[in-house]
Amino acid sequence: MNTTASPLTASKRGLAIVNIIAFAIMITTNALSIILPLNGKSQMQLSAQYPNLFTPAGFTFSVWGIIYLFYLGFTIYQATVLFKMQHPGKEKIALASPYFIGICLCNAGWLFAWHYQHVMLSVSIMFVYLILLISIHQVLQLALPWKSVAQKL
């Protein structure tokens, strides 16, 4: 029995590790933006500098906790799939992984752009973030009606 990993398997394992690192960068940057905060200003202070009529109530931002839990779930799931020798979803997860890495890096980059008050850059990063979310949705075919809730999650 051959116990060495093929180059293809090794590259998918490497992809899983990069996904984990990207997720860690995103979470660390988010934590630092709250703990430090970045550039000495909280997100609430920054938001107050740009008065408008559509800023949601502060508690609505708590949805990000749920989003990060789903990102954590994906990070764990993709690592288990990409480290297995055989898994039916391995190819799709491998195809979705670069988009997920981009999402994590956009999330972290947006925080720096926002906290350092580069508003147009932060909006541009959010636009890229949206494109990456749509792309990962397409790669994983999440809108197909015959997919079970478990597969969609």
Image (spheres, grey):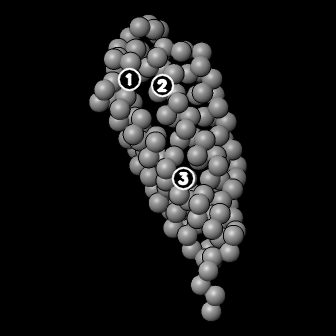
Q: Quadrant of residue 129?
A: top right
Image height of 46 relative to 1, above or below: above
Label 1 packing within 10 angstroms: few (<14), some (14-19), many (20+): some
The quarter of the picture where residue 33 lies is: top left
Return the x and y of residue 106 as percentages of the image width and height.
Answer: 56, 34
Q: Closer to the N terminus: mark 2 or mark 1?
A: 1
Q: Which mark is residue 38?
A: 1
Q: Amino acid at mark 1?
A: Leu
Task: Report, in whole angstroms, how far the alpha carbon at label 2 lies from the one at label 3.
Answer: 20 Å
Badge 2 vs badge 1, beta-carbon distance below 8 Å = yes
Q: Which mark is residue 112?
A: 2
Query: Which residue occupies the foreground of this view, 16 or 149?
Result: 16
Q: At numbered mark 3, what does the secondary structure look like: helix, strand or loop?
A: helix
Does the residue at mark 2 contact the one at mark 3 (Cβ under 8 Å)?
Answer: no
Q: Amino acid at mark 3?
A: Asn
| Residue 22 visible here | yes
User: Looking at the image, how many numbered discs can be counted on the residues?
Assistant: 3
What is the number of the mark on residue 19?
Answer: 3
> Which sits in the foreground, 53 or 18?
18
Rendered position, 128 above or below 72? above
